Image (cartoon, helix red, strand yellow):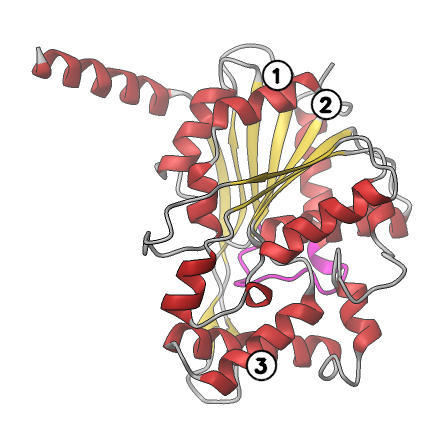
Amino acid sequence: MKSMLMAICLFLSAALHAQPALQQYTALSGTLRIGPGAKDVLPLGERGYTLLLPEGPLLGLIVSLDDRRPDTAARALVALRAAARPAGLGILHLSSGIPIDLFHDDTGPRRADSLLRRLLQQYGKPGLPLFFLGVNLSGHRAMRYLRYQERAKRPPLNVRGIVFCDGVLDWVRMWHESDKGLRDRFAESAVFEGRLVTYLLQKFLGGTPRAREDAYLELSPYSYFDPRNRHLHLLRNLAVLAYSEPATHYWMNVKGKTVFDTNFPDMVGIVSELKRTGHADATLQLFNQPDDNTDRRNPDYTWGLVDKKVLVGWMLERCR
């Protein structure tokens, strides 16, 4: 009986992976400097796209703006694909090939916009309902893309919603988190992240937030320190769903971090400010794991907790 069940599972998995995955990538040469040292560089990756089509008519498209090529065999993507395919939703990953791509200028958003529009035209679906999937920095990039569209006065696409999943949105907070990680030296991962983040932000924005606060607020899709909430109008007509797993005991005991040193405040903050200003379709979903759970936490961990069938249902309701 067990062997029969295993055979059925293998057959279903093979059938799922047999569905068309359209991919086109170009390997980039060169490196990204992430610090002042000779070895402080990361190699560039592959630029292009992966398009996963549904089994029937294409009714909507889930779009993720990434910095690297996705692993189509990753458990979370397989689960999302299994939920999206029969529902008529495609999944599009656009990769810039630039590690830790912050879309700090218009180059990245412009390139993503050109490719996205070309693919929509290719499939004869220029008005297709779109949902941005923002796991980790993909949420930041989606907001930067929406801002680019507004500033460049591009013809509007049919964006219906955006999903955030434990990603950084507030770069003033993130700089201070990273600076504190360098000072505390509690965990090697925090020291590495602190060096990388402070270096890149100060390079791209011309200094620290103490000297260049407005530049940091311009980069931040949402910031606790922005009295104007200057970018939240981009979400005025979009459905917003944010996922977060606070994991306060993990961050405190394993990484020596406070709540402010995680992305949890960004997820709560953006939904809270949207609700406070009258947004009718902004939702925050929290996951609470046992206090003694010491599994390594990151946005991908939170994404793994998301019920993909429920998420696809949320999108379908907003395709109508």
Q: Looking at numbered disc 3 in the image, what kind of residue is underneath it? A: Asp
Does 101 lie within the magenta span? yes
Eyeballing the image, is 271 above or below 92? below
For residue 84, side relative to residue 253 (left or right): right
**Residue 49: image x %, image y %?**
54, 41
10 Å crowding of disc 1: few (<14), some (14-19), many (20+) = some
**Residue 99: image x %, image y %?**
52, 63
First in sequence, mark 2 or 3: give its number: 2
Task: State whether residue 309 appears in this view.
Answer: yes
Magenta residues: mostly which secondary structure?
loop
Q: Looking at numbered disc 1 in the image, what kind of residue is underneath it? A: Leu
Dividing the picture into quadrants, the one containing residue 163 is top right
Residue at the disc numbered 1: 58
Q: Residue 128 — which label?
A: 2
- At 47% from the left and 89% from the top, the residue drawn is 37
Eyeballing the image, is 170 above or below 2? below
First in sequence, mark 2 or 1: give its number: 1
Is 4 or 97 nearer to us in this picture? 4
Stretch in magenta? 95-108
The reply to whether callout 2 and callout 1 are in contact (CB within 8 Å) is yes
Does 27 lie within the magenta span? no
Extreme residue in the bottom direction: 37
Report the Cα–Cα distance between label 1 and label 3. 46 Å
10 Å crowding of disc 3: few (<14), some (14-19), many (20+) = some
Report the Cα–Cα distance between label 2 and label 1. 8 Å
Residue at the disc numbered 3: 179
The reply to whether callout 2 and callout 3 are in contact (CB within 8 Å) is no
